[in-house]
Image (tube, rainbow, N blue to C red):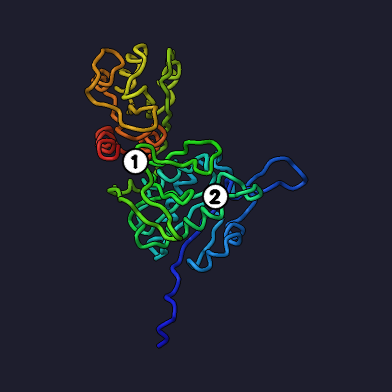
Amino acid sequence: MDSTARAPLPSSLVLSLGGTIAMASQAGGQAGVAPRLTAADLVAAVPELAQEAVLELLDFRQVPGAWLEVEDITALAELLNTQAASGTAGFVITQGTDTLEETAYLLDLLYDGAAPVVVTGAMRNSQMAGADGPANLLAAVRTAVSAQARDLGVLVAFADELHAARHVQKVHSTSTAAFQSPGVGPIGHVVEGRPRFHFTLRRHAPLGLPMAHPAVVEVVEATLGSSGLLLNAATEHVDGLVIAAFGGGHVPRTWVERLGKLAARIPVVLTSRTGAGSVLARTYDFGPGSETDLFSRGLISGGGLEPRKARLLLLALLRVGADQTSIREAFETRG
């Protein structure tokens, strides 16, 4: 037997959803770029991938990140669950960065496999100098087929950093280092072509599919002197609400009566608009609008979840049919 024979390459499924990484100039000389490149085009631009994995390619969507819907990501999660059960070693998802952090987190709530799922994209399209898509795709594939990445849930690979879906946020509109995990840092890095993990996170059980119950959840942000006019609209049009509060969980005192009435009817989750750190529980008690006051009125603590991810968790819970008690318990363990 030839002792120098290489082990067979692992398999990985690359799913393209569009976004900047797949954008190129439009036909007819029209200004600006649009999603035009296929998964095959993306892979062809990175010859090193042939040495890393046997790749199966799927053009799942071809849209800007801003056009993606919850239904798109639900369908993607269903596909990942099926493919993981059939033995695919890892998954790479390329998409637009506008909603990348939200896609990653929603998938993390719904994906039930152990095979790594790595989401990536690009800040510079393929025709710009220093396009970052090829390097990000290579790092994502290398992570997706790594045994060390198994059972870590959904990860984001960007600029050779690896982030947990639970913590990652887009913090810059144009920088190639746009993705960070405020207050926590990356879970790992890709070094000399291989992922190295610094710590792991406890993975929660998936919420389950299908998300069959229709629901509407919105975010309302507290701002200086806000009248809270959007709270009035929420009374009739939403099934759940997330409050992006000041600091440790505070709102204008003119909001509190309306929030108390809303919390008696629908789940209202209190988060911090700061993007890092947790809402508090009992530090401030200055009266109406303090976190102590708001929790006494029935609001649910979002813990350390930033508002957009708290919205996705609440939305997913409502859509799988969770009741108020289950929703509170979910936020206690995942927040």
Q: Residue furthest front?
A: 192
Residue at the (28%, 18%) spot, across then down:
290
Secondary structure under the numbered disc 1 in the rendered image: loop
Q: Could you say where residue 191 lies in the image, as x and y percent from the top left?
A: 43, 57
From the viewer's perspective, is 302 left or right of 157?
left
Please say if 200 is above or below 261: below
Question: Label 1: which residue?
Answer: 184
Question: Label 2: which residue?
Answer: 17
Give the distance between the C-alpha atoms of the residues marked 1 and 2, in whole angstroms. 28 Å
Secondary structure under the numbered disc 2 in the rendered image: strand
Amino acid bearing label 1: Val
Near mark 2 (Cα within 10 A), the count class, few <14, some 14-19 or many ≥20, is many
Near mark 1 (Cα within 10 A), the count class, few <14, some 14-19 or many ≥20, is few
Q: Are marks 1 and 2 in contact (CB under 8 Å)?
A: no
Q: Nearer the viewer, residue 82 or 115?
A: 115
Residue 110 shows in this picture: yes
